[in-house]
Amino acid sequence: MAMKNPPHPGRIIKEDCLPELKLTAGAAAKILGVSRQTLDKIMNGRSSITPDMAIRFEKVFGSSAETWLRMQLAYDLAQARVREPEIVATIRPLGHAA
């Protein structure tokens, strides 16, 4: 069963992975081969985890790239569900396309 309000996976990096490895965001960004700003956007939920970043997280923090991407998908879908009434309001029934 899907979580109703799953956390952004960046929060897991920020609250679990970095403290466990005793890394600062700057040090983690260097290890990951990305800018501090890129990692900061993910950790603060302003950017999504891409397949490229999921592979980087897999190699540095553990958990498979697929797991990181599933967490991102669960978060994204939960956010879309919040907007579901707006989305549904724009759908036209079949046979009524203009």
Image: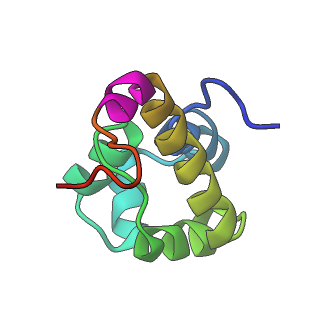
Horizontal side of 81 relative to 74 (left or right) equals left
Q: Who's the residue at 36% across and 55% down the image?
A: 95
Image-based side of 5 in relation to 44, left or right: right
Residue nearer the viewer, 60 or 55: 55
Say which of 50 and 18 sits in front: 50
**Relative horizontal placement of residue 70, taking residue 54 as reference (left or right):** right
The reply to whether the magenta stretch includes residue 84 is: yes
Q: Which quadrant would the C terminus be assigned to in this image?
A: bottom left
Query: Residue 69 magenta-drawn?
Result: no
- What segment carries the magenta color? 83-89
Please, is residue 69 above or below residue 2 in the view?
below
Residue 22: % across, % down: 57, 45
Above-or-below relation of 88 to 55: above
* Drawn side of residue 83 relative to residue 74, left or right: left
Q: Residue at x 60, y 45 (%)?
A: 74
Per the picture, the main secondary structure of the magenta-coloured stretch is helix
The N terminus, quarter of image: top right
Residue at the image point whose x is 30% and y is 48% from the top: 47
